[in-house]
Image (tube, grey):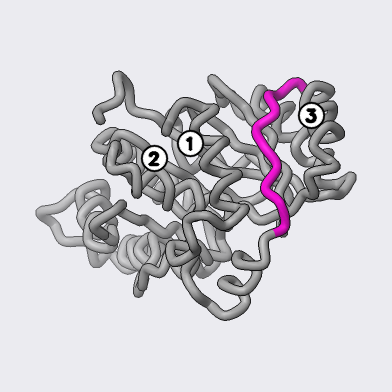
Amino acid sequence: MKLAEKLVLAVSGKGGVGKTTITALITRLLSESGKYDILVIDANPDSNLADVLGVKITKTVGDVATGLRTSIDKGELPPQMSKMELLESRVFEILKETPSFDLLVMGRTEGEGCYCLVNNLLTHIIDTLSKNYDLTIMDMEAGLEHLSRRTSRDVDIMFIVTDQSFMGIQTAKRIKELAKEVHIEFKKLYLIGNRYPAASENLLMKKAEEIGVEYGCIVPPDENVLKHNFEGIPLTKLPSNTPAIKAVRRLLTKVGLL
């Protein structure tokens, strides 16, 4: 299935609410559908998404960016290549291709000093790269200030994940407010309650209405997810009828992607 337009999905929220788990489940279900060419970007500095998806990564974009910065400082750039061309070639080299999706892990840059040039180049490269896919799925770090540095493209669908805490809801509210400050436009914003009991669904619906976002779903506590994460088993190997999978499937059907 080719979409009429390229879509960018992002998953954000307070640290520790399970953004990476939700991103992995979304990636699994959309890739299993066979409808889309998918690029997954792990923009969370903790860089756990590859492990949760069962993909081995040896180098991150942060490693590449650090290497380029070092080469610039030492004047060691190949004379026949521009900085953009060199960085782009290195990013494409570390793009991990799988039968179901392609994965790019941002990681962290190392060392001191300003990475403004490298960050600007990366923004252009990621924007260009994502246009080659039907869907780009981004696992974000907490907050939104960094998002404008990762991509200048608008995010079509933002899934804001919260847990059962006041701070989780407050972070969701700030994400909505910060979007205007960093000039990011969302076509849809959905609030997801992760590890929420069914009895709390109405409460979360009310909070979504108060914040001014759409209610997405609750993902109930799931022993299968806990066991897989604890033992380091990729969530791609979860039983297809497990409660978390069922909840995210309903969400993606509601959004219109399944």
Amino acid tagged 2: Thr
- Nearest-to-viewer mark from 2 and 3: 3
* Label 3 crowd (10 A; few <14 / some 14-19 / many >=20): some
Q: CA distance from mark 2 to mark 3?
A: 27 Å
Label of residue 9 in the image? 1
- Furthest residue in direction bottom, as rendered: 231
Which residue is painted at 52% across and 55% down in the image?
241
Which residue is painted at 67% across and 61% down in the image?
222
Nearer the N terminus, badge 1 or badge 2? 1
Q: Main secondary structure of the magenta part?
A: strand
- Label 1 sits on a secondary structure element that is strand
- Label 3 sits on a secondary structure element that is helix
State if disc 1 and disc 3 touch (CB < 8 Å): no
Residue ID for mark 2? 136
Magenta segment boundaries in residue numbering: 212-221
Amino acid tagged 1: Leu
Nearer the N terminus, badge 2 or badge 3? 2
Task: Find out whether residue 218 is within the magenta segment.
Answer: yes
- Furthest residue in direction right, as rendered: 166
- Label 2 sits on a secondary structure element that is strand
**Is 214 drawn above or below residue 232 in the view shown?**
above
* Label 2 crowd (10 A; few <14 / some 14-19 / many >=20): many
- Please tell me which residue lies in front, 29 or 70: 29
In the drawing, does residue 36 fall left or right of residue 222? left
Residue ID for mark 3? 205
Nearer the N terminus, badge 3 or badge 1? 1
